[in-house]
Amino acid sequence: MFKHLLVSNRFLHKTSYKGVFSKCSLSLNASFQKANISRCVIKPLTPDYAEQATILTSLTFSQSEPVNNALGYSPMDFYPFAKSLVSTACEQGLGTVAVDRDSGMVVATVYSEDFVKGMLSGPNYDVNKYRVIDALLGQLLDKYFSNPPQETGSLSHNLQTLITPEHVGKIAHVCIAGTYGFYASKGLMVHLAEAHLEQCKSQGYEQAFVECSGEYSRRVFYKLGFATKSKIIYDEFEMKDENGQVIRPFAGKIPKPHSSINMVWKYKL
């Protein structure tokens, strides 16, 4: 789930809501409860599947992902952002979908963006509309990049030297992973995420990270060799509101078992 850069002020405007990960459940008609993942075929996220992937993201994130749910976002609130992410993933060839063989319905998706390219270009959506999540993700990345681990694989994680054109195509930032409830808890997300990482690796990406907003997504990526390198406890997260007052927007609003947003990394794909 998000289940989904205060490094210096000059990077703050490049912080983006593009790190929200969710392995979500969305309760639909009971007739879907016997869905079998053997009915799915894994395919690249192309423009043909873009609208379905956008709708899936908007529905599952607004109803089941802990951060969006706590903020009261509707599918319509999330749709413009999801559309932007899907468009970027299609353009960069960094998306994967699970398609039901019989109906042609997209039932799960995982997609990424090129991290360095995204930092260099900045967000392409209304940052003010998602300012709480921007602040949350900004603090999470700040916490990591202000003191990155000594061992970070083939790349230095000094942000000043990392965010340069020569590092484009090196780090995949997994933005979204979601599935409808009738395909949840069947192993589909692990299978799909693994296929997606292979897709990234085949394009030359060396590393990947995800901001997991809940317990379920962490379990998925832990199974694939990721490890938590930075996290923020929801009840302790503070930011300033529009009037400059310090607030804790998530205090008491995030249901168990979710307690923190975790940045998980895999330094070698």
Image (tube, rainbow, N blue to C red):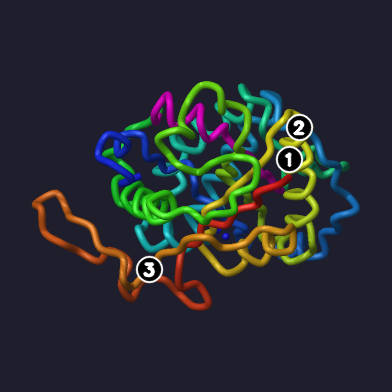
Question: What type is the residue that disc 2 sits on?
Answer: Pro
**What's the residue at 80%, 37% (across, down)?**
104
Is the Cβ of the residue at disc 1 closer than 8 Å to that at disc 2?
yes
Residues shaded magenta: 108-123
- Front residue of 28/266: it is 266
Closer to the camera in the image, 99 or 161: 161
Residue 202: % across, % down: 79, 32
Give residue 55's mark: none
Locate residue 216 relative to residue 195 in the image: left or right. Answer: left
Residue at (49, 46) in percent of width and height: 19
| Membership of 115 in magenta stretch | yes
Q: Which residue is mark 3?
A: 234
The answer to whether residue 52 is left or right of residue 211 is right
Which quadrant is home to the C terminus? top right
Is residue 150 a member of the stretch shown in magenta? no
**Gap between marks 1 and 3, in whole Å?**
30 Å
Question: Which mark lies nearer to you, 1 or 3?
Answer: 3
Query: Which one is in front in this view, the residue at disc 3 or the one at disc 2?
Result: 3
Mark 1: few, some, or many residues within 10 Å (few <14, many ≥20)? many
Residue 118 lies, with reference to residue 148, above or below; the image says: above
List the residue tagged with mark 2.
Answer: 44
The amino acid pointed to by label 3 is: Tyr
- Disc 1 target residue: 97
| Disc 3 packing (10 Å; few <14; some 14–19; many ≥20) | many
Residue toward you, 64 or 198:
198
Q: What SS does tag 3 mark?
A: helix
In primary-sequence order, the first of circles 3 and 2 is: 2
Question: Where 234 falls versus 3 (above or below)?
Answer: below
Q: Position of residue 244 (x, y in %)?
A: 10, 53
